[in-house]
Each structure stands twice: as structure tokens, then as C-alpha cells.
Amino acid sequence: LKQSFRAQEGNLQAEQQRLPLYLVLKNFCFQLAASCYYQKNKFDGQSLGDQDETLMTSISLSKLFATGTTLGVTYQRNADKYVFPTGATIPTSLPGDRVTQDVLGLSVQQNLLADFFGRADRADIRSANALYDAAMISRVSNLQDLVLNGIQTYWSAYVAQQTFQQTLAARSRYQKLTEAVRKKTKYGYANPGEVEQAEAELEGQEQNVKSASVNYLSALDNLITLLRLPAGRGSGRRARGRSRGP
């Protein structure tokens, strides 16, 4: 039954419930952000110099906790480079032609009101976990039903096969009986109407064989479909009277 489409369908339907759980849990992942900014300015007649270049780099890391608290850490560096005219004197307010500033920040955010200290977030997690657990339980129940259905389908095919074999054997006996009655009639030993009665009974057995054959092939096709076996696997040969099981 592992290769059955119904088994695969049950497993995939259960796996679909992972998505709501992951959609909730992704809100509690670490968030990493980085940026880089470059700027170049040119000045005419300014005392600080002809131009300056600014390179700003920042990186931040934040995370939301189940308590509704968001913690964040940010680091930022600003690097300025000044270009002075030839022979110009660097202002005393500047330590040199390069100035670097590093900034480290810490932020704390807390949810209130509807999500007071993460009450709504924790409820979302519990709900998503409950849905996933229910899907796993339903998966086991569906697979148990599938196993039971598989056993029932197998035995239905087996009983149909045995019935078909019995009708074949009964037809063979009536064929021999009809042939014997015809011989008796040929030699004048048969009673009036005995041949007609034997032929009528033989025709009834022929109809029983056809009916049993249709039932057997239908039951066998149901089993092959359920087990996802190659189409037409042995159905034609078995319908002709082999005695092995389905």
C-alpha cells in the first residue's frame, strides 16, 4: 500500500499542515539586515576643502520573542574623508583628513494591548501546533482505514476468483453430463426431453461463468487500482481459469 495513490494523498494532506505552523514560527526568526551607503560632495570656496567622501556601513540583528518583546542590536560606522586644496591648513576642529565614527545601538520593543506580552503570539503557536498534531492523528487514522480497505478489496477479489473457478468446474461437469445424455439419445436410451433439459442447464452454467468472470475482473481491477499495480496485470490470464490467488 506504500505506493498507493491514496496513501500518498493522505501523507501529503497531513504535510500541508506544516505550512501554518512554519508561517507562525517564521515571525520568531532572527532578522539580519545590512546596508552600505557612499556619498561624494564637491565644494567651491569652502574652508573645509574642495570635496569630501562619506562611507556609511550598518548592520543590525533583531528577534521577536514569545513574550511579545523584540530585541535589536545595531552597529553603524561612518567614515569621512576630506580633500583639501594644495597648501591648505587642516582646521583644528578636525583630527586629520579622515574621520571615523562608530555607533552601537540596542533597542527593545514590547507589544501591548491585544498582544499584551505576547499573548496573541503564543496563542497562534498553540493553534498551529494543535492543527499539525490533529493532521498527524488524522493521517494515522486514514492509513488504518486504507489498510482495512486494502484487506477487504483483496478478499473480495479472492472470493470472486474462487467463485469463478467453481462456476468453471460446474460448467465442465454439465458439459460432460450433456455429452453423456446426447450419446444416450443417439442410442435410444434417453427419456423424452432429457437432452433439452441438460442443454438448458448447461446454458445456465454458461451464464453463471460469464457473470462470475465479470465480477472477478471488476474486483481484480479494484485491487490493482488500489495497490497502483501495472494496468492489466494478469487479469486476462486469470479470467481464463487459473487457480492461483489474486
Image: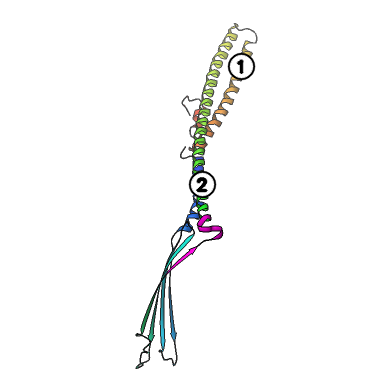
C-alpha gap between disc 1 and disc 2: 65 Å
Examine the rendered structure and indicate whether residue 8 appears above or below residue 194.
below
Instruction: Give the residue at x 59% y 26%.
Output: 211
Question: Secondary structure under badge 1?
Answer: helix
Looking at this view, is 130 or 163 the one in front? 130
Q: Amino acid at mark 2?
A: Ala
Is residue 98 shown to the viewer in this render? yes
Examine the rendered structure and indicate whether residue 233 appears above or below residue 77.
above
Q: Is residue 112 left or right of residue 96?
A: right
Q: Residue 148: x and y, percent?
A: 51, 32
Q: Amino acid at mark 1?
A: Glu
Instruction: Give the residue at x 56% y 60%.
Output: 113
Q: In the rendered structure, find residue 230 and report the number of the disc placed on it.
A: none
Whether residue 116 is in magenta: the answer is yes
Residues rendered magenta in the picture: 103-119
Looking at this view, is 27 or 153 the one in front? 27
Whether residue 155 is in magenta: the answer is no
Examine the rendered structure and indicate whether residue 94 appears above or below residue 240.
below
- Mark closer to the chain start, 1 or 2: 2
Q: Residues within 10 Å of mark 2 (few under 14, many from 20)?
A: some
Residue identifier under label 2:
130
Instruction: Give the residue at x 52% y 19%.
Output: 169
Residue identifier under label 1:
201
Q: Is residue 32 left or right of residue 96?
A: right
